[in-house]
């Protein structure tokens, strides 16, 4: 998969334990807009997706995460690789998070389901929203001035790549 960039916060010691967590993230276009997750509480946008669970493939995680976060059903045969980013940070954890995020372009069917959000996602008030990349980039830049979260920085960088290439 095409490598995009690496975000390394360098906020850890070499002796810190490391957790490797691959993740799958979906890029879904509809009428020139992206299906994104918007945090109503914080005002940022992110790509639907998340961590790969034990004994799960990247593609299976993509399909599951998109359905849980958006209620949309991915058409498996439509999935195409787009690119990958790397993230390494200690942040608030007792370990270093070493995460490869794999981005896939995919289509969804007309079938929809109820969101199945985690406690954190409910608290952030995640909703599905279709937005053009520029709108999401501007909202994320405003958010990043107040609170720098590596995950939002990462998705903003990918949004910029999409805006440039699309």
Image: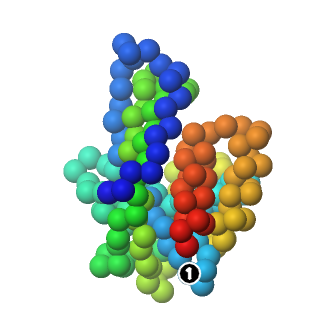
Q: Alpha-carbon neighbours of circle 1 within 10 Å: few (<14), some, or many (≥20)?
A: few
Residue beneath the point at 26% across and 47% down: 54
* Image vertical order of residue 149 relative to residue 32, above or below: above
**Quarter-of-image position of residue 2:** bottom left
Whether residue 121 is visible to the viewer of this picture, yes or no, is: no
Q: Position of residue 15 (x, y in %)?
A: 36, 13
> In the displayed image of the protein, which residue is found farthest to the front?
164
Is 29 situated left or right of 3 in this image? right
* Image vertical order of residue 132 relative to residue 101, above or below: below
Residue beneath the point at 46% across and 40% down: 6
Residue beneath the point at 65% across and 48% down: 123
Numbered marks: total = 1
Image quarter where the N terminus lies is bottom left
Is 77 situated left or right of 131 in this image? left
Whether residue 33 is visible to the viewer of this picture, yes or no, is: yes
Residue beneath the point at 22% across and 50% down: 55
Badge 1 marks a residue whose secondary structure is strand
Circle 1 sits on which residue?
A: 30
Q: Position of residue 164 (x, y in %)?
A: 58, 65
Q: Tell me which colouring the rendered structure shows.
A: rainbow
Q: Position of residue 149 (x, y in %)?
A: 62, 39
Is 153 situated left or right of 42 in this image? left
Q: Position of residue 83 (x, y in %)?
A: 40, 58
């Amino acid at each position: 998969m095409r490598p995009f960039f690496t975000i390394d916060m360098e906020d850890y010691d070499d002796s810190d334990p490391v957790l490797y967590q691959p993740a799958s993230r979906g890029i879904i276009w509809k009428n020139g807009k992206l299906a994104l997750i918007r945090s109503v509480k914080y005002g940022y946008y992110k790509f639907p997706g998340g961590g790969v669970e034990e004994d799960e493939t990247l593609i299976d995680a993509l399909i599951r995460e998109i359905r849980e976060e958006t209620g949309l059903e991915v058409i498996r045969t439509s999935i195409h690789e787009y690119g990958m980013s790397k993230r390494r940070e200690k942040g608030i954890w007792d370990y270093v998070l070493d995460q490869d995020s794999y981005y896939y372009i995919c289509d969804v069917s007309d079938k929809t389901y109820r969101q199945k959000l985690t406690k954190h996602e409910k608290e952030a008030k995640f909703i599905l929203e279709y937005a053009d990349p520029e709108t999401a980039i501007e909202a994320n830049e405003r958010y990043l001035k107040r609170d720098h979260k590596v995950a939002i920085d990462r998705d903003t960088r990918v949004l910029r790549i999409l805006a440039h290439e699309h």
